[in-house]
Amino acid sequence: MAQKTSGEFEKEFMDGLKGSTGKDLAAWLDIVDGLGTKKRNEVIERLKADHGFNHMQASLLAGIH
């Protein structure tokens, strides 16, 4: 079985955001903008604590942002 590339995994995550969270990527990028921090680790922790993302999801979203 072939493993997904990081690009495929990231695209799958972005495409599934609306279905799994009710918000599309643009809405999540606006939320990240409003967190009041640009530090990656702080963004990840806030996404996990405030929005219920797991570490991998929060890290992907922070990286996309």
Image (cartoon, rainbow, N blue to C red):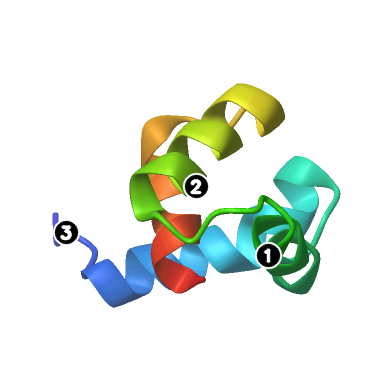
Q: Residue at x 16, y 59 (%)?
A: 3
Residue highlighted by disc 2: 43
Decide if residue 3 is on the left or right side of residue 32.
left
**41 lies above or below 49:** below
How far separated are the C-alphas under marks 1 and 3? Answer: 32 Å
Label 2 near label 3: C-beta < 8 Å? no
Residue 23 in percent (x, y) is at 82, 55
Image spot of residue 57 (x, y percent): 46, 44
User: Upstream in the sequence, badge 3 or badge 2?
Assistant: 3
Farthest residue to the front: give it: 36
Tell me which amino acid carries mark 1: Asp
Which residue is under mark 3?
3
The spot of residue 62 in percent (x, y) is: 46, 58
Q: Is residue 22 left or right of residue 30?
A: right
Query: Looking at the image, which residue is at 54% across and 29% down?
Result: 48
Q: Residue at x 44, y 41 (%)?
A: 42
N-term mark: 1 or 3: 3
| Foreground disc of the pair 1, 3 | 1
In the figure, is residue 52 to the left or right of 39?
A: right
Which quadrant does the N terminus fall into?
bottom left
| Residue type, mark 2 in image | Val
Which of the labelled discs sits on residue 33, or is there none? 1
Which class describes the residues within 10 Å of circle 1: few (<14), some (14-19), or many (20+)? few
Find the distance from the CA under tag 2 to the CA under tag 1.
Answer: 9 Å
**CA neighbours of label 2 inside 10 A, class few (<14), some (14 to 19), many (20+):** many
Query: Looking at the image, can residue 57 be seen?
Result: no
Q: Nearer the viewer, residue 19 or 34?
A: 34
